[in-house]
Image (tube, helix red, strand yellow):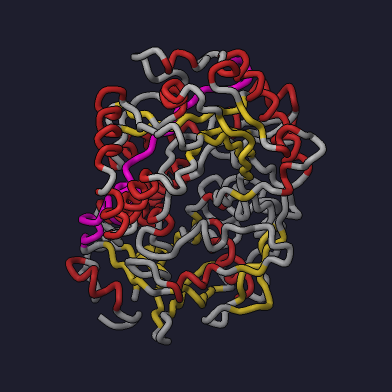
């Protein structure tokens, strides 16, 4: 197959990019390793080699298939705070080479697509009722923010833009795992990629340009495989490929007392504003970070739903997101009509989720892991079912991560006292949170927010991509992934990934308008109305 551009990965970034480019009449071929729904054999390709067994999210934090990890995404949408992408000399971090401000123009487009309201993320966005006013919005050490969350159904990007994927300009091949690279060594370009399916069929795609949008871990592995295909010559002048791998680290630090069930529900249960669910996001302020010389951190509230009828409600919603309806959970949920009626009344009258008093509210802290060269991904000796090297992890939390946890816990405790929560909804700290002698990082887990291992920068010797997201070493290969983040900040990466994908598409379109005619010929295999058939067809068959 041949097209002006080939996208590797049909997750959030890949589909956002392909959709935008195809809208202007350009042909895009998209290669996706997975199928339309979960496939255990394909999921096994996510296995990694990790001698220390510290990174636990390789199989639970990423999913191959149409829509990618958005089929499991929790849906928290919130931008990275601007100061976290600026120079932070107090922790020896330089600024991003990319002005995050120029991505703000995509906020409305994304919010509209996900059916989110256009209210603010920062401060006290709720101006009605008494309980929200109890959150100090001008606290010097904890910044009050509210994440926006689309419905579970709209979390899955493949469902949201399903009709647009029928465009004759988008050709999607499912079950197509990239395993080979055709390289023009003389000119330093990638000419083609070869994909295979589990039945042994192969597909070669030739393109002028390639966008790797396969998530941080797989994107990094693919670039390492590309380097290996050139006898490690492609990225020989770059010392950053695979290094500086980072993730948010999370730990449950306290349980919020519910002795006043009504008040605790009013303060900490999910809220709704203009039909958009809003989640509390308490972020360590710039002043707190400077004073303590630590990285970013944020706290949020989770609910222990185990054994609760609300768990069945969540399972039903998630099954819709995954396009695999859970009939058993729906039946169990229907047997709790009293709770459902009460929840509906709270949603209508109070704009909140009703949470029964016997369900615990847990307070979790997530800290930004600072870039460290020793935290890296490289190619393993072990091979996957296609005979390709697996990703080998050398990663662990560091002492600076412990310091950030301690800073966040200290400021949260003080915030609770200043806000008056200590009397009505006191915190029951975990042993590790209460005792500085017990390292929190020993039990902390990655948040499945991987980033950093194909970092962006202006110096080709110390970064993989430039501020245009193109590889310094192979300029016709661009990366649309959190793997380009120089630092992670204290926000879920998905919103920024979406905006980067749209910005990259606009950049490509601007270049295409000046250099090439629109490509509109029909493809031999179009997604069209044959989506279901194609999802099970081997690569190479129409």
Asked if residue 352 is positioned above or below residue 540 in the image, the reply reads above
Tell me if residue 267 comes above or below residue 388 in the rendering. Answer: above
Q: Position of residue 439 (x, y in %)?
A: 77, 42
The furthest residue to the left = 529
Residue located at (61% from left, 31% from top): 86
Q: Please provide the residue range marked out in magenta.
A: 139-167
Residue 324: quadrant of the picture: bottom left
Q: Nearer the viewer, residue 408 or 64?
A: 408
Residue nearest the observer in this picture, 26 or 404? 404
Question: How far across and down, in percent of the image, does residue 21 sit?
Answer: 31, 53
* Figure quadrant of the N terminus: bottom left
The quadrant of the rendering that contains the C terminus is bottom left
Count up the numbered dots: 0
Q: Nearer the viewer, residue 100 or 309?
A: 309
Magenta includes 397? no
* Residue 55 visible in the displayed image: yes
């Amino acid at each position: 197959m041949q097209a002006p551009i080939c996208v590797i990965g049909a997750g959030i970034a890949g589909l956002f990019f392909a959709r935008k480019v195809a809208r202007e009449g350009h042909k895009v071929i998209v290669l996706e390793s997975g199928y339309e729904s979960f496939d255990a054999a394909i999921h096994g390709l996510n296995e990694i080699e990790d001698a220390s067994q510290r990174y636990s999210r390789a199989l639970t934090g990423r999913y191959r298939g149409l829509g990618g990890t958005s089929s499991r995404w929790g849906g928290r949408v919130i931008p990275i705070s601007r100061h976290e992408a600026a120079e932070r000399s107090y922790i020896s971090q330089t600024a991003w080479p990319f002005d995050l401000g120029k991505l703000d123009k995509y906020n409305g487009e994304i919010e509209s697509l996900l059916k989110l309201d256009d209210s603010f993320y920062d401060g006290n966005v709720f101006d009605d009722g008494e309980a929200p006013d109890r959150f100090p919005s001008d606290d010097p050490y904890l910044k009050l923010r509210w994440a926006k969350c689309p419905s579970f159904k709209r979390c899955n990007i493949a469902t949201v833009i399903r009709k647009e994927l029928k465009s004759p300009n988008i050709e999607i091949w499912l079950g197509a795992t990239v395993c080979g690279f055709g390289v023009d060594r003389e000119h330093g370009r990638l000419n083609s990629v070869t994909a295979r399916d589990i039945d042994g069929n192969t597909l070669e795609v030739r393109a002028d340009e390639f966008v790797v949008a396969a998530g941080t871990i797989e994107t990094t592995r693919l670039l390492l495989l590309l380097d290996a295909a050139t006898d490690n010559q492609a990225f020989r002048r770059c010392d950053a490929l695979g290094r500086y791998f980072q993730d948010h680290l999370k730990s449950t630090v306290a349980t919020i007392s519910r002795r006043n069930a009504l008040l605790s529900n009013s303060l900490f249960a999910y809220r709704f504003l203009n039909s958009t669910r809003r989640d509390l996001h308490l972020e360590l302020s710039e002043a707190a970070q400077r004073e303590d010389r630590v990285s970013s951190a944020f706290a949020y509230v989770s609910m222990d739903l185990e054994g609760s009828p609300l768990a069945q409600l969540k399972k039903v919603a998630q099954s819709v997101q995954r396009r695999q309806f859970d009939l058993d959970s729906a039946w169990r949920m229907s047997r709790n009509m009293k709770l459902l009626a009460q929840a509906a009344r709270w949603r209508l009258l109070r704009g909140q989720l009703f949470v029964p008093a016997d369900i615990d509210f847990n307070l979790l802290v997530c800290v930004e892991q600072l870039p460290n060269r020793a935290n890296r991904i490289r190619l393993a000796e072990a091979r996957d079912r296609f005979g390709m090297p697996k990703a080998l992890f050398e990663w662990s939390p560091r002492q600076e991560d412990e310091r950030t946890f301690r800073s966040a816990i200290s400021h949260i405790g003080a915030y609770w006292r200043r806000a008056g929560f200590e009397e009505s909804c006191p915190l029951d700290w975990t042993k590790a949170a209460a005792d500085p002698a017990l390292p929190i990082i020993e039990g902390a887990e990655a948040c499945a927010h991987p980033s950093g291992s194909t970092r962006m920068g202006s110096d080709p010797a110390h970064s993989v991509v430039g501020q245009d997201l193109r590889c310094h070493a192979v300029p016709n290969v661009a990366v649309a992934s959190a793997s380009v983040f120089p630092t992670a900040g204290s926000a879920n990466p998905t919103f920024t990934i979406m905006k980067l994908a749209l910005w990259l598409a606009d950049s490509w379109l601007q270049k295409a308008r000046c250099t090439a005619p629109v490509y509109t010929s029909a493809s031999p295999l179009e997604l069209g109305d044959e989506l279901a058939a194609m999802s099970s067809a081997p690569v190479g068959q129409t």
